[in-house]
Image (cartoon, rainbow, N blue to C red):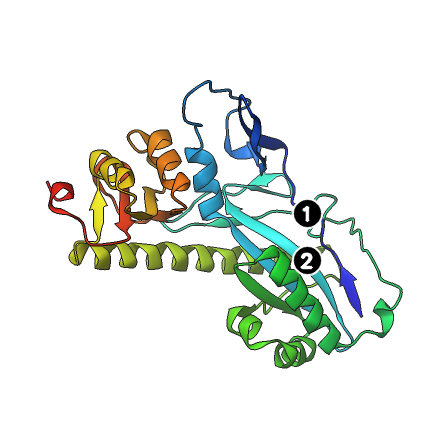
Amino acid sequence: MIVDDITEVQNNGRVLVANASGVLLNADWDAAIGAGDAAHFTQEPELGAFARERARSVRMLVAIADRTGATIRRVVAAEEHELDEQTERNVTEAANASVHKPREGALSHKQIQRRADEATKQNLREVAEHLDETSAKWHPDVVVLAGEVQGRNELRDELSDVLRDMAREAENGGTDDDAAEEALAEELRSIASDVANDRSQELTERYEHAAAHDQAVEGADRVARAAEMGAVETLLFEHDRSATDEAKLLGASVRMDAQVGLLNTQVEDAVAAVLRFEAPDELKK
């Protein structure tokens, strides 16, 4: 049996970017991390905080399995977001992620379940196929297998190689009652924190390797000049410090299809970039 528990991620705000031609960006925004409404009338949109929130967030495809099927949820976990109306804070240097509840609550006490007519007879292989289809559309960062041990072990065996490589197990929690839901939420927080830490560490190591081979720069001026050359492959911000000329650098990098990520080390002007090719001499000054 598959029970879809997939609903819109909780959010109470929007990020809108528009110009004379119309709306260019209309995206979810968790206003809990901001200070209320804000408007900017500038040449480049002020999207630094939005880019950081997206870079910190972890998309989790969660399957809570038993021997006959699974409840499937999409959960987005992000640093400093609310869980059951209690704000989670960073208690270490690493990202301490809080789990979003889908609106009307896969992690709340009232569950809304969409059941297909044939759901009661679907087996774990069909669950795995459903996870494949959902993953192809939603692109999760991690697949989490939860629920009873035998059910999640059998489901793991049915996963495609791609999803099996992405899978992590939640040892505790489930859907039986409020205590089980909270135990599952704690497991998801821990897994999301690990994924966010691994991602940031991987980017930092990649940047350091690139810098050692003259394929990275730091500082707002050098990154801006690299962007003008079309050389920026990945724009890197510090976690908690705004970069000099942040909006301009972000806009220039996005227009050349550069990726955006976060570093867990300090760099000049709180901004750096991994380059597509070896830095020319003028970028080394």
Of pointers 2 and 1, the one earlier in the residue sequence: 2
Residue 22 appears at what percent x and percent y?
Answer: 58, 26
Residue 192 visible within the image: yes
Which amino acid lies under the numbered mark 1 shown in the image of this protein?
A: Pro
Residue at (16%, 42%) from the top-left corner? 283
Q: Please state, as top left, top right, bottom left or bottom right, where the C terminus lies in the image.
A: top left
Kindly identify which numbered label has been placed on residue 73.
2
User: Do the residues under discs 2 and 1 have CB atoms within 8 angstroms?
Assistant: yes
Instruction: Give the alpha-carbon distance from disc 2 to disc 1, as whole Å.
Output: 8 Å
Left-right relation of 30 to 115: left
Between 272 and 29, the one lying in front of the other is 272
**Mark 1 surroundings: few (<14), some (14-19) or many (≥20) residues within 10 A:** many
Q: Which residue is mark 1?
A: 102
Location of the N terminus (image quadrant): bottom right
**Which image quadrant for residue 104?**
top right
Residue at (54%, 69%) from the top-left corner? Answer: 168
